[in-house]
Image (cartoon, helix red, strand yellow):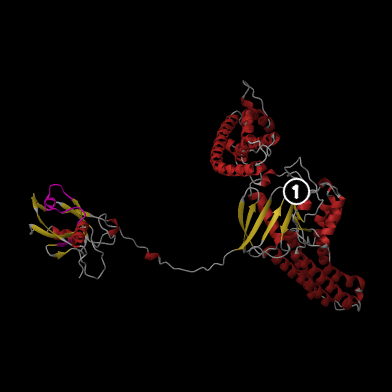
């Protein structure tokens, strides 16, 4: 995750992940847990590099669930859900975005540390505009 | 005025005392030993002069009396008549036991002050009485205003009397090496005041036989007012000025590094010295010379290092090379001594703790053997008559089982010089009488107490020497260092000023204390 400067556009290397919701009884579940949000305490986030990062992070993956099948990993930061930005969301708003009953599929843009390193490694320098 | 050298510390003019005190002082001078006013041990801080023997009950070097060691002390200079008179006196009295002249010098200051103040007290009354006695018929009658003045005069004199008794009539606690400047100043002031009033009175009233009695009474009243103001001045200079703290004194004992910090106000060096000594006797733990040396095993190890080398070599031609080799080898060997010191200290701690445990258990057991007999129990034991003992006998009865443990403990902590068997018995008797627990009895032995606990009560006082590079009547200031020397140790006092405090203010609205919870929720989707 790149350093976050408030007010400036955020540049990150992201991965597109598509998760199909699973129906369990009355609920549609995705199979992971989220933590973080702009109303939460960012210092307690074990996955973030920058302890002032108030983004939404994946904190747990249910084994065998749809998220694991779609290769979502613990510690991923969710940048977009179905086109909606998740970097400045409260926790509850994020939850609502992910659990809309009329959507069967969520398309996430996630970023993780290893992605940046892989890009750097392959390209030799970090692409900046 | 008076050129006497030794000024008693804290009793200013014992003013307005009756004439009986003057007589009592004269009697004291002729009395050789006993003194009733010094019930506590007094301290005399004097300048050390050669030839003056200083060993007394507190000295620990009983075997090596050296009466001439004073010649090597670095001593305050100052060729005032003070030192000469001191030398004369000490040549007369060689032994401290018969130091009567020295003791009498303690009271010269207050005696002079007492005379002066008695004189000052009697003066207004004399002003009033003399015209009545000498030319009563010629005086103008003076009715109510004079009587009003009489009343006010009487009350002011009463107030002077009472406040002088309260403030100044105290036994002297210290003898200072130089004049106590403020006290001298005040005595001179009083003398000048009274003398000038007498002068005026003699020239203007007695000579022409003044007839206006009311004027005379007013004159006497004005003298009493002036005396009250001088007493106010004395109160401020002697008692109040040094109360506000201005300096921090660090007092370090030279032998074992025990140190304390004290806050004092503006004082001269000699007064500060007396102040520090007052605190020394109750704050510092008693000086134990037996604790100074490293345990023998460590020192002897070093010695054996040398000895091994010296015995092996016997050739003399390259002795210098050998000695150098010896010293180098010894220097290399020295790396181990701290190790040995550490283990030796640990061993010593363990030994002390072991002995202490045995002592505590022995004392607890001993205390269970006796119990206090209440009044109503006396009649209730016809069957098994118990022997009724007084505290002394009870103490002796239970001392035997704990004596050995106590002696071993005292030997291990090297306190055996401070506690004789008699003193332990007395203390035990005291504790039994006052219903103390064994722990309270042991408190005196488990930790070294302040020096005042070990003092014997004799009126002779303790001899200290004030060693200073500045004249001892100068005021304290930053960076001053002086030391107070006794026979085998000294206290080094360093003066630092207290920092100036800039106090700011911050107002906090009580309603401004608000809190939020730290959220860290995790939701599964």
Q: Is residue A77 left or right of residue B352?
A: left
> Magenta region: which residues?
A61-80
Residue B386 shows in this picture? yes
Chain to which mark 1 belongs: B
Residue B18 shows in this picture? no
Quadrant where the image shows the C terminus of chain B: bottom left
Mark 1 element type? loop
Q: Is residue B339 above or below residue B159?
A: above
Q: Position of residue A14 (x, y in %)?
A: 16, 61
User: In percent of the image, x 69 and y 53: which residue is there?
Assistant: B277
Q: Which residue is mark 1?
A: B39
> Farthest top residue?
B383
Q: Position of residue B306 (x, y in %)?
A: 62, 39
User: In percent of the image, x 12 and y 49: which residue is there?
Assistant: A65
Between B360 and B320, the one nearer to me in the picture: B320
Q: Is residue A83 above or below residue A64?
A: below
The quarter of the displayed image where residue B367 is located: top right
Between B398 and B384, the one nearer to me in the picture: B398
Q: Position of residue B47 (x, y in %)?
A: 77, 56
The quarter of the displayed image where residue A38 is located: bottom left
Q: Is residue A29 above or below residue B153?
A: above
Between B113 and B3, the one nearer to me in the picture: B3
Residue B244 is one of the magenta-drawn residues: no
Q: Is residue B181 left or right of residue B135?
A: left
Q: Position of residue B120 (x, y in %)?
A: 82, 67
Residue A67 is one of the magenta-drawn residues: yes
């Amino acid at each position: 995750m790149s350093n976050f400067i408030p007010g400036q556009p955020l540049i990150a290397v992201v991965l597109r992940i598509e998760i199909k919701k699973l129906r369990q009884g009355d609920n549609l579940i995705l199979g992971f847990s989220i933590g973080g949000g702009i109303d939460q305490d960012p210092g307690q986030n074990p996955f973030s590099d920058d302890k002032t990062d108030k983004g939404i992070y994946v904190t747990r993956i249910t084994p065998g669930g749809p998220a694991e099948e779609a290769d979502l990993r613990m510690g991923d930061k969710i940048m977009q859900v179905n086109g909606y930005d998740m970097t400045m969301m409260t926790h509850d708003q994020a939850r609502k975005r992910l659990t809309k009953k009329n959507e069967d599929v969520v398309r996430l843009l996630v970023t993780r540390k290893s992605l940046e390193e892989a890009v750097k490694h392959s390209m030799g320098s970090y692409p900046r505009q | 005025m008076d050129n006497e050298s030794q000024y008693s510390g804290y009793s200013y003019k014992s003013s307005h005392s009756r004439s009986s005190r003057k007589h009592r002082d004269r009697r004291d001078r002729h009395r050789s030993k006993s003194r009733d006013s010094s019930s506590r041990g007094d301290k005399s801080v004097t300048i050390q002069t050669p030839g003056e023997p200083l060993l007394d009950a507190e000295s620990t070097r009983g075997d090596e009396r050296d009466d001439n060691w004073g010649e090597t002390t670095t001593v305050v200079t100052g060729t005032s008549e003070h030192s000469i008179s001191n030398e004369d006196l000490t040549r007369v009295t060689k032994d401290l036991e018969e130091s009567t002249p020295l003791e009498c010098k303690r009271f010269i200051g207050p005696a002079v002050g007492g005379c002066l103040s008695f004189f000052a007290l009697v003066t207004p009354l004399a002003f009033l009485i003399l015209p009545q006695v000498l030319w009563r018929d010629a005086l103008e009658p003076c009715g109510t205003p004079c009587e009003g003045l009489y009343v006010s005069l009487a009350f002011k004199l009463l107030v002077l009397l009472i406040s002088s008794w309260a403030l100044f009539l105290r036994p002297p606690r210290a003898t200072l090496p130089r004049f106590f400047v403020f006290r001298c100043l005040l005595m001179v002031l009083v003398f000048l005041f009274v003398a000038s009033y007498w002068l005026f009175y003699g020239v203007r009233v007695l000579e022409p036989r003044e007839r206006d009695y009311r004027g005379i009474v007013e004159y006497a009243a004005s003298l009493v007012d002036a005396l009250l103001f001088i007493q106010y001045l004395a109160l401020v200079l002697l008692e109040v000025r040094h109360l506000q703290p201005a300096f921090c004194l660090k007092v370090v004992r030279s032998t074992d590094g025990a140190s304390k910090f004290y806050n004092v106000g503006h004082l001269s060096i000699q007064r500060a010295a007396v102040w520090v000594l007052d605190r020394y006797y109750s704050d510092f733990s008693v000086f134990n010379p037996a604790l100074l040396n490293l345990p023998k095993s460590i020192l002897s190890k070093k010695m054996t290092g040398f000895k091994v080398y010296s015995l092996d070599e016997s050739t003399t031609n390259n002795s210098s090379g050998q000695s150098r080799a010896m010293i180098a080898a010894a220097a290399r060997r020295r790396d181990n001594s701290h190790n040995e010191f550490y283990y030796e200290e640990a061993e010593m701690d363990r030994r002390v703790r072991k002995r202490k445990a045995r002592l505590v258990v022995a004392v607890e057991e001993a205390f269970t053997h006796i119990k206090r007999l209440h009044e109503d129990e006396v009649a209730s034991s016809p069957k098994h008559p118990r022997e009724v003992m007084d505290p002394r006998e009870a103490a002796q009865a239970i001392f035997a089982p704990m004596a050995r443990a106590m002696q071993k403990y005292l030997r291990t902590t090297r306190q055996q010089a401070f506690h004789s068997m008699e003193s332990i018995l007395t203390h035990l008797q005291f504790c039994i009488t006052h219903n103390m627990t064994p722990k309270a009895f042991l408190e005196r032995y488990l930790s070294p107490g302040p020096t005042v606990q070990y003092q014997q009560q004799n009126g002779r006082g303790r001899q200290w020497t004030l060693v200073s590079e500045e004249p001892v009547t100068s005021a304290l200031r930053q960076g001053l260092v002086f030391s107070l020397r006794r026979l085998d140790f000294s206290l080094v006092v360093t003066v630092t000023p207290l920092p100036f405090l800039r106090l700011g203010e911050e107002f906090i609205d009580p309603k401004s204390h608000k809190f939020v919870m730290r959220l860290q929720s995790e939701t599964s989707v």
